[in-house]
Amino acid sequence: MTEELRVAVVGAGMMGADHIRRITERISGARVAAIVEPDAGRAAAAAERAPGALAFAGLEEAIAADAIDAVLIATPGQFHAPVLRPALEAGLPILCEKPLTQDSASSLEILELEQRLDRPHIQVGFMRRFDAEYQQLREVIASGDSGELLMVRAVHRNPSVPESYTQQMLITDSVVHEFDVVPWLAGSRVVSVEVKFPRRNSLAPERLREPILVIMELENGVLVDVEMNVSVQFGYQVSTEAVLERGVARIGQPSGMQRWEAGQFLVKEHESFTTRFAAAYDAQIQRWVDAVRRGDLVDGPNAFDGYLVALSCEAGVRALTTPGAQPVTAVERPAFYA
Amino acid sequence: MTEELRVAVVGAGMMGADHIRRITERISGARVAAIVEPDAGRAAAAAERAPGALAFAGLEEAIAADAIDAVLIATPGQFHAPVLRPALEAGLPILCEKPLTQDSASSLEILELEQRLDRPHIQVGFMRRFDAEYQQLREVIASGDSGELLMVRAVHRNPSVPESYTQQMLITDSVVHEFDVVPWLAGSRVVSVEVKFPRRNSLAPERLREPILVIMELENGVLVDVEMNVSVQFGYQVSTEAVLERGVARIGQPSGMQRWEAGQFLVKEHESFTTRFAAAYDAQIQRWVDAVRRGDLVDGPNAFDGYLVALSCEAGVRALTTPGAQPVTAVERPAFYA
Amino acid sequence: MTEELRVAVVGAGMMGADHIRRITERISGARVAAIVEPDAGRAAAAAERAPGALAFAGLEEAIAADAIDAVLIATPGQFHAPVLRPALEAGLPILCEKPLTQDSASSLEILELEQRLDRPHIQVGFMRRFDAEYQQLREVIASGDSGELLMVRAVHRNPSVPESYTQQMLITDSVVHEFDVVPWLAGSRVVSVEVKFPRRNSLAPERLREPILVIMELENGVLVDVEMNVSVQFGYQVSTEAVLERGVARIGQPSGMQRWEAGQFLVKEHESFTTRFAAAYDAQIQRWVDAVRRGDLVDGPNAFDGYLVALSCEAGVRALTTPGAQPVTAVERPAFYA
Amino acid sequence: MTEELRVAVVGAGMMGADHIRRITERISGARVAAIVEPDAGRAAAAAERAPGALAFAGLEEAIAADAIDAVLIATPGQFHAPVLRPALEAGLPILCEKPLTQDSASSLEILELEQRLDRPHIQVGFMRRFDAEYQQLREVIASGDSGELLMVRAVHRNPSVPESYTQQMLITDSVVHEFDVVPWLAGSRVVSVEVKFPRRNSLAPERLREPILVIMELENGVLVDVEMNVSVQFGYQVSTEAVLERGVARIGQPSGMQRWEAGQFLVKEHESFTTRFAAAYDAQIQRWVDAVRRGDLVDGPNAFDGYLVALSCEAGVRALTTPGAQPVTAVERPAFYA
């Protein structure tokens, strides 16, 4: 395909607007051909950043107009399934922001629909897999140079969260990333999830009982602990330490310009995921566009990975209110997703 | 006291010999006046490093000879109680290597004996409290500048362990340090201990099921996880991260000369506790000598702290074979130790 | 301009091929429309990576064919002037790899030719200005938060150099970057250049007397020293330290995944400029494409900056054989380049 | 010698008082037996910290009283020679704070006096040689593992200086340390000294034209540049980078507890030499005491090293007002000091 890929972006909220900007200004080989957004104001604002993009109220209309080659879904999670269905029926390649759908049952339905096609068409937007450091960490683990992986010790810290952020979202909006990326690093899936409660942060919103310590076991015996902490005030920090048999590797440490000022040596910490993972978002979209243009359609986590994460989230949500390890039981991976 | 403190070192094995060298070569205001060691060969070797020291087969003889002002106990843990008793009866100040005694019941007996004296006479050799970084970490926590302490995430990694090291010693010889230093950092005692098992390190001796992840709860709600790992091969590493409400502080990170060689930026890691905590051992002895000369007798963890650690060790050993959090229940702290 | 910018890449050697790949695979809003390369083999190889690009033996033909909107010059430096002239005559925007031309006299001629147009059309490829850390360093200096800039201490280390690399190229190929970026950081131009000779590296090719220490004075009094070192073997390292009145800022330090292995803490160092400055090359081209599409034509160092660098290089080359500070004297900056 | 070494401390100003405290509280095997200080107030204050020390108005009296075994000279530099002479005549071992004397001519006289004894009796107080990182750096260089040493790039930054600090003291009080330690690192002596002037720090006292860049050549061709900067406000920083043929080693980088606070990753920088070199001062005195007790008398820089530093200082002071490299010419090293 030498033509530019015509992408429909569905949802023009914060995330969708960001992807529209990205495709328009950063990505080679693709353009935003359609913006699907029922809110007229948002649709108009988004259209300004994407010259030549057509506006549609629903994805079906964009499909009917033969205006698009691929779909990027950036609506809130509960609206993913209603967009995934017509996109799959039209046989379009899809990049779907995480989560795939909002529970494992609806994810299974989507898997069935997708399996009617000749090959996987859905990629799920777990962008950490495209971060250069996570990729290096995975290579170190996979190389076996330091022996087998034994433990993963992860930290996910946010300065604060918006008013809409609920206790369950500690799992479904935040730890959800570790549910995808840790199995990808470790080459083994999650078999149980447990939650421990440290002393509560008095700076957290009243509705939140956090931080939490999430403990996961993987099928290969690797133990994972994740400090999930969303009111740390000081910055945005995601770091991961892999404990191997004869070595340790660590990513997400301070980098960039170093300063000495007022008795201190200083390095600036990130303030949000938008800088911490900026390059990963770019790489994710560029690699997806390249894959679709090549005909591979998916180059990243697929819909079955999205289903596994939905299961871990369900176990994690149970663990928020139930002591002990909550088991995670999945259907067998279909050959289709091998 | 302008005279040098005359110290009896009891036990001239590896640890005792090291303390004899330290007092002789590094410490101001003290000298090794007596070496109490039944093994004649060891006693002779030790005496060479401490010119002028007298040799005794038992502490009672050294006391009878009026040759000493204070006692440093460096025998194996099971032989602490038989030395502590006559030393207390003679009213001598004591620096006792950890553990105080080998179980909480015998520790309680020693506490009762000590309380017959006018004030505490026993200091226990938890040397981490004398490490400059642990002290800085404690100041940061105590200052409240970053809000309350919420979690402590600790790492204790050894390159390997000797043949005599057993599964229980993961708790009683290694995590024992965290049982003392974490409550000291956090200002709150341990109320439960739990052990989780990651994938086993195939490089560990066959008798060991390790690494382990030890999870402690403190009375003030602080949650602590300790990665205890004694076959990491690559070096000796003890690091601690304090998660506070609006900040994080971390100690035990690589330091010293930095090199670039063969495509890498390198900093040497420690190989054993002897370099990692060399300055802490010096500081511990110097401060104890100063305290005794001033008449304060104790400047560090006292016998009641030693008893609390014995309780945590007992819970930790239970946790090695019993799932779930094992409670730690202590007698009330006597006013004598306030 | 909603259409993609049609770029002619002149020169399809290593650098040109890299830019062709970059425009084709990474850059939004531009495509390689023409490849100008007399070597038929190189031209063919390059064309494979740029589907749809036409091949031309000379730039004049591409212009005559009305096939292009802008020119990227990636030939060796001595062939820049013969390409710049027809491109300027055709009124095309130009991104010219460094150096502008190979001496200050020919640079002046190009400046005159360019000034017949309505505004600057030439951007020179000093890509360091597009590196995120150099930009942060410049902001710190410009902010005045740490007082005035006093010194710049720079390091430029290559593992090795190809056979074609000569003694003069220490200045014209390597220090040339500092001649552009340091004045840009400091807001002041170079007024003299001096070279000092440390002990010679026995691993350098016989024809090279290196490393060298290059000392520059800027008009505002700032003193700069640059360690220029091209046989360090261990990696590619470019770092810069700005000494301010009450602070210091440093860039180019090790970053990325950290490992512990075999008694060492390790971070990988770069091996060549292709990874160290990969993002800067991308950003340079993207911002130039954006500027041309907006009608700004230049968004970076202009031809007058290229002329100033040519003067510094001439002084630097003199300084290789003449002791003491060699003065740098420039014509006044025309208002055209203000 | 099993008895404690009886040390006379001459001079009880800031430095002398610090050494009195050090010998009394930190050093094994020595005690302050005499304080020689004409100022009665200072003498009394010092005596309080050294129980049992006798007070003398002059060193001769202490010698006559047969009260001392060794002399530590901590008077201002211009009063060193008058104390060195009687001490040498009495055949006492001496630790003399830097400089040996205040010029090379008087240093030569002292050398002659010393050579009447059977072996060197004077050690000069260049304490950096006892800093663990400088020792590691020297080992790396001496090992040859990274090839020959080519350059040394040094930084010496003070937050500010007292009112008594003059322009010459940039050389004689500050760079003086590099005049000793760099030749010791490099295994080669200084043959010329040059000074360059960057932009002046407006926060420096009016009488000071600083920072300065001091360039030294060593006999083996190694080139050294030292940034000497005494009004940096932000902290006390001494760092040194050794550029070797196939590697680089660097010391004096930030270390210790790491914090995240308010968007920043922070490590505390030193505020004065008293913390940066605290352990080096302790080690220097302990090793000197041990050497004297063993009968070696000197374990560190000797008087001939002190004479060489005096020569470098004289060249450096000339270089403050004379452009170009100022040569350093020394008498041959007597076999006595081999």
Image: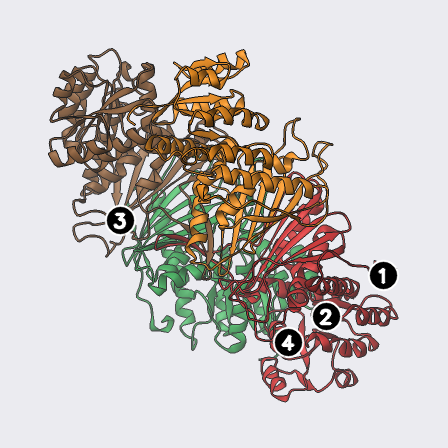
Chain colours: A red, B orange, C green, D brown
Mark 4: secondary structure: helix
Q: Position of residue D165 (x, y in %)?
A: 18, 44
In-front residue for pair C135/A184: A184
Q: Earlier in the sequence, mark 4 or mark 2?
A: 4
Left or right for B80, reference A110: left
Left or right for B238, reference D57: right
Camera sees residue D246: no
Q: Nearer the viewer, mark 1 or mark 3?
A: 1
Mark 2: secondary structure: strand
Q: CA distance from mark 2 to mark 1?
A: 23 Å
Q: Which residue is mark 4?
A: A16
**Looking at the rendered structure, which numbered label has been put on residue A95?**
2
Question: Disc 4 marks which amino acid?
Answer: Gly
Residues at discs 1 and 3 in contact (Cβ within 8 Å): no
**Looking at the rendered structure, which numbered label has been put on residue A331?**
1
Q: CA distance from mark 1 to mark 3?
A: 70 Å
Q: Earlier in the sequence, mark 4 or mark 1?
A: 4
